Image: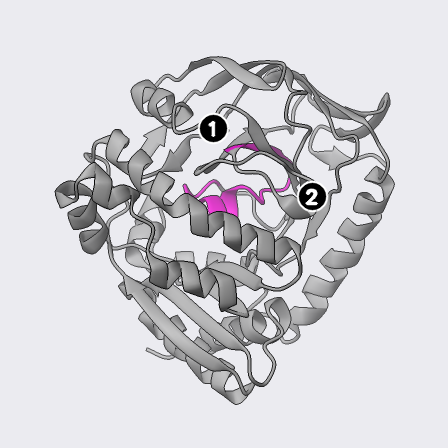
Amino acid sequence: MSDVRRKNLAKILIHYSLGVKPGDWVIVSGDLVAAPLINDLVEQILLAGGHVDTVFASDEIMGTELRVATEEQLRWTSPLISFAAEHVDAFIELFGASNTRSLSRIDPAKQRARKQGQRPYLETFMRRYAEGKLRWVGSQQPCQAFAQEADMSLRDYEDFVYKSTFADQEDPVAHWLKMRDEQERLVQWLKGKQEVAVRGPHADLRLSIEGRAFINECGENNMPGGEIFTSPVEDSAQGWVEFTYPAITGGREVEGIRLEFEAGKVVRASAEKNQDYLLTMLETDEGSRFLGEFAIGTNYGIQEFTKNILFDEKIGGSMHMALGRGFPEAGGQNHSAIHWDMICDMQKESEIVVDGEVFYKDGKFRV
C-alpha cells in the first residue's frame, strides 16, 4: 500500500542525505521486507540521473549461510563486494527483518568468522568515506517484526518511524537543517578539547579526545539522525560503565553489560543475559576490546527504547559507546571487524565533564 510518508522518506534519503547527482552509481541494499521503500528509492535515484543496483537479503538466507558454511567460507571476502566498496559513489542500507530472532541460535563463533571476512571491504568503505569519495546512509522500512520488538502495532510503529525522520512534515529538510545548526554549535565548542569524564550511577569513566574531531550526525549517514560522536584515543579509556539498555546484535539481546577499562582496553566484562556471546565478540580480533566510538544522543523526538539501534542510539538524554572499529573521519585508528553500539541513560544524576567544565548534565547540554 502506498504511503506518502514513505515516498517522502525516499526523497529525504536521496536528495538530502546523499545528494545523488547525475552519473552517480548508487547501491541500495536491504531485506526483502524493505522492497516497497527500495522501489521508491530506485525511482528517486533514476529521477536524479543516477545509476542504481539493488541487493536483496533475508533472514532465511543469512541463517542458511551461517549454518551451512565452513569457517573458511565465512572468512572469504567477496571480490564483487570489494569492487563495489572501492568504486561505488553512494550506498544505502535499509534495515528490516521478518524475524528479529532468526540468528539467536547460531554459533557466535560463526558470526565472528563472518565479520572477519567482511573486514577488508569494510575498511575500504570507511577509508573512502573519510576521504569524501563515498556517501552512505542507513535507514529503515517499518515492518511487523520491528513493530513487535517495540511493543507496537505496525500502524503505531510507522507513525514512530516517520515522525522521527520528519517524513510526516511538509518540509522535512528544514527540520534536519535546524538540527544540523544546533549540533554544529556543540561540535564547534568541543574543538580542541582534550579530556572527557563521564560520571553517574552507571559510569565513572575518563577518555582522551585530544586530536579527535566530533562529527555532527544530522540525518546524512543515519536516518533518523541525532547524535554527535567521535572516536576516543584508543589507549585512553579508564574506569567502568554499565549500559542501562540491552545491546542487541546478531539476533541476541545482551542485557546488563558492565565493562571495565584499563589503558583503553576492556579488561573485565560481564552481562546479566547472554554473557557468553559478549565474551565471544570481545575475542573477535585485536581491536574488539577497544572503543571505536563515544557519542551523545540528541534526538529528543525519540524517547522510547524500541530494540533497534538505528533509533535507540539517538535517544535524547542518552550516551552510547561502541566497541571495535573507529571512524577515520574523526581521527579513529582502531581497526576491528565489529562496531557494537551500547547505550546508557544519562537523565538522572549523571554528567559529562569536558576539560573540567560541565558540558552535559541529566540529559541536557549545559554549554
Label 1, secondary structure: give it.
loop
Picture coordinates of residue 332, whole percent (x, y)? 65, 38
Whether residue 261 sits left or right of residue 251 in the image: it is right
> Which of pointers 1 and 2 lies earlier in the amino acid sequence?
1
Indicate whether 347 appears above or below 16. above
Q: Nearer the viewer, residue 359 or 250?
A: 250
Residue 268 seen in this snapshot: yes
Local packing at callout 2 (Cα closer than 10 Å; few below 14, some 14-19, many 20+) is many
Type of amino acid under label 1: Ser
* Left or right of 166 on screen, residue 153: left
Residue tagged by mark 1? Answer: 288
* Quadrant of the snapshot with the C terminus: top right
Report the residue marked by disc 2: 330
Q: Does the magenta run of residues contain 116? A: no
Report the colour scheme: one colour
Mark 1 residue crowding within 10 angstroms, few (<14) / some (14–19) / many (20+): many
Vertical comparison of 10 with 137: above or below: below
Distance from label 1 to label 2 (Cα)? 18 Å
In the rendered image, the quadrant that contains the N terminus is bottom left
Q: Is residue 15 above or below residue 185?
A: below
Q: Residue at x 16, y 44 (%)?
A: 69
Amino acid type at image mark 2: Ala
* Image: magenta residue range: 305-323
The residue most toward the left is 68
Q: Which of the 4 quarters of the picture holds residue 128?
A: bottom right
Q: Is residue 317 magenta?
A: yes
